[in-house]
Image (cartoon, rainbow, N blue to C red):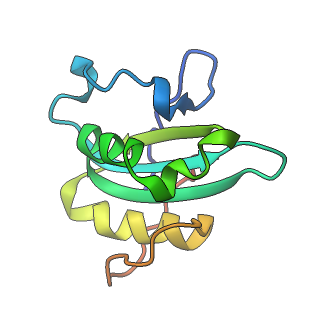
Amino acid sequence: MTTDWVKNQNGNLYKLDELNLSSNHFDYMTGVYAINHGGNTPRTVRVGQGFIRDRLQAHREDQAVQYYAHLGLFVTWACVPHNSRDGVEIFIAQQLSPVLGERYPNVLPIPVNLPW
């Protein structure tokens, strides 16, 4: 499956703390997302799924995610059909090994193109 990861006009990830989550862009948007941190050794912080606006807002307030804010937190997301989201989420988690998150769907992974 090919996913269309959303990035800014320059082809870069959005800064989590600067993203306008009140934008109509996020109305009813569901899919998968990935958050990473910058710094000398960038790493994936968290992957997940659901209503993108709600999930990203929750991560803005999550102390475990914000622990990495001093390195810069960056995010991208992709719309994925509901019946494929669990498989896509587990595939991304297996490939990117996020530092946070220990519970993922118990389903067969669905391979997709990775966000970075």
Q: Front-most of 52 and 2?
A: 52
Residue 98: x %, y % from top left: 57, 65
Residue 75: x %, y % from top left: 51, 39
Q: On the picture, is 99 further left or further right than 52?
A: right
State the residue at coordinates (37%, 81%).
108
Q: Is residue 32 above or below residue 84?
A: above
View extreme (left): residue: 28
State the residue at coordinates (42%, 75%).
109
Residue 79: x %, y % from top left: 32, 42
View extreme (bottom): residue: 106
Q: Quadrant of residue 25?
A: top left
Residue 76 in view = yes
Q: Is residue 97 above or below residue 19?
A: below
View extreme (right): residue: 40
- Quadrant of image for the N terminus: bottom left
Residue 79 in view = no
Q: Quadrant of residue 77?
A: top left
Residue 91: x %, y % from top left: 48, 69
